[in-house]
Image (cartoon, rainbow, N blue to C red):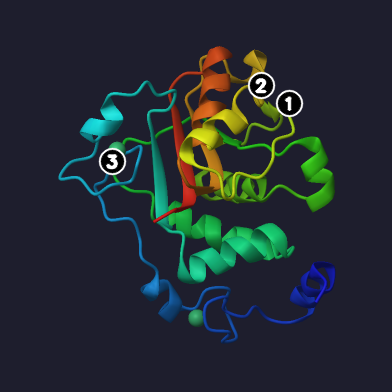
Amino acid sequence: MHWLLEAFLDLLFPPRCVGCGSWGKWLCDNCVKAIRFLEEPYCLFCGKPLPYWGTCPSCANELHALEGIVSVAYFEGPIQEAVHLLKYRGRTALASPLAELMASRLPHSDLKAEAIVPVPLHPQRLRERGYNQAALLAENLSKKLGIPLLNGALERIRYTRSQVGLSALERKENVKGAFRADPLKVAGKDLILVDDVCTTGATLEECGFALKQAQAGRIWGLTLARAP
Ligand SMILES: [Zn+2]
Ligand SMILES: [Zn+2]
């Protein structure tokens, strides 16, 4: 079915669970129980479980633009299905319950910020898709957390191919220099950078790098899902 039609049907009918298809909620209580959340505490860069909040020895050797990346659940099961529907099937109504999940599972790290910035799409990709799923999540998070959303603070200035199927190194190369941040909007501000999925963290790091060049303060990555 065309995604526009599905999105239209969403307006007419009550939501159905993306995990089991039952009526009533986008994610029913049973499917929420089945979600594999990231075990806290974990390494703030690779997500590996640690006995403390911080950076594991192999990640500590690298320079990071970000303070860390906080993710809610593993990219699998109903979460993977939900991201797919949100990103490729026009099911924008999912942004609110998924942002709710992100807000409610914000772990006890010292993730604090003055503003929220979504990972941007290139204008061409935005035209193709019609919306930016990261921006929808960020918008909903902004409302739920009471932290202002910074629109247009970060832009994608280079069209890059999808990161799907690329190695960690290729992912880094693919997004290198792809972003630019506006110092007038971000200078001196602590920020939360929002995306749907973190795989190697290359995109978030590159965004963080652009924000740092624009004199941003501390920057945290926050994603709904993380590659297992
Ligand atoms: Zn369900
Ligand atoms: Zn690590």
- Name the residue at 45% across, 41% down: 200
Residue neighbourhood size for the residue with mark 2, other residues' Cα within 10 Å, grouped as few (<14), some (14–19), many (≥20) = many
Circles 2 and 1: CB atoms closer than 8 Å:
yes
Mark closer to the chain start, 2 or 3: 3
Dot 3 amino acid type: Cys
- Name the residue at 41% across, 54% down: 72
Quadrant hosting residue 99: bottom right
What numbered label is drawn on residue 58? none
What numbered label is drawn on residue 180? 2
Mark 2 lies on a secondary structure that is strand
In the rendered structure, the answer to whether residue 161 lies left or right of residue 61 reads right
- How far apart marks 2 and 1 lie (CA) works out to 7 Å
Dot 2 amino acid type: Arg
> Circle 3 is placed at which residue position?
43
- From this viewpoint, is residue 79 visible? yes
Q: Quadrant of the N terminus?
A: bottom right
Q: Position of residue 186 (x, y in %)?
A: 59, 20
Q: Position of residue 114 (x, y in %)?
A: 50, 29
- Name the residue at 54% across, 41% down: 194
Mark closer to the chain start, 1 or 3: 3
What numbered label is drawn on residue 157? 1
Q: Along the line of sight, which residue is nearer the eye, 113 or 202? A: 202
- Mark 3 vs ligand 2: CB below 8 Å: yes
Q: Along the line of sight, which residue is nearer the eye, 6 or 177? A: 177
Q: In this view, which residue lies farthest toward the left?
A: 51
- Name the residue at 61% across, 32% down: 174
- Mark 1 vs ligand 2: CB below 8 Å: no
Q: Quadrant of the C terminus?
A: bottom left
In the rendered structure, the answer to whether residue 202 lies left or right of residue 228 reads right
Q: Position of residue 69 (x, y in %)?
A: 40, 39
- Number of labels in the image equals 3
